[in-house]
Amino acid sequence: MKVTSIKVDEDLWKRLKILAVKLDMPLGTLLNRSLEALVEGSGEPFVLKAQRRNVEALKELRSRGKIPLKIVSKKSAVELVREGRGD
C-alpha cells in the first residue's frame, strides 16, 4: 500500500469524514473504494448497507403498488446481474 500526501479542500474533508461515520466505514476504506470506482469507471464508489427502516419503507411503497426502485441502464437485466456476480 502506498502512503502519500494530497491536498483536499477542508470542507470536502469534513464532509468525507461525516460520510464515513454515517456509513460505518473507515475513511481510508471509503477513499480507496471511491478512487477505485472512479478509475474503473463504475461510478459507484461503494455499496451502502441496507438499513432496516429503509427496507421497510421500500416494502411499504411496494405494498401500495408503487415501484420504489427503477433501474435505468442501457444494459439488460441479465447483463447487470452477470456484472454483479463477477461473470
Image (cartoon, rainbow, N blue to C red):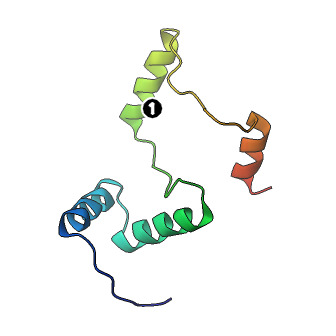
Relative to 78, say whether 20 is above or below.
Answer: below
Q: Identify the residue shown where x is 47% and y is 90%.
A: 2
How far across and down, in percent of the image, does residue 67 sit?
A: 53, 18
Which of 84/76 is in front? 76
Relative to 42, say whether 13 is above or below.
Answer: below
Per the image, the residue denoted by label 1 is 55
Locate residue 43: give its quadrant: bottom right
Whether residue 84 sits left or right of residue 53 in the image: it is: right
Relative to 75, say whether 38 is above or below.
Answer: below
Whether residue 11 sits left or right of residue 39 in the image: it is: left
- Secondary structure of the residue carrying tag 1 is helix
Q: Residues within 10 Å of mark 1 (few under 14, many from 20)?
A: few
Q: Identify the residue shown where x is 28% and y is 60%.
A: 21
How far across and down, in percent of the image, does residue 85 sit?
A: 73, 52
Tag 1: amino acid: Val
Whether residue 70 sits left or right of residue 85 in the image: it is: left
Q: Identify the residue shown where x is 19% and y is 69%.
A: 10
Residue at the farthest top position: 64
Locate residue 19: give its quadrant: bottom left
How far across and down, in percent of the image, does residue 34 sit?
A: 47, 64
Q: Identify the residue shown where x is 25% and y is 67%.
A: 13
Q: Total of numbered circles in the picture?
A: 1
Q: Quadrant of the C terminus?
A: bottom right
How far across and down, in percent of the image, does residue 15 sit?
A: 24, 59
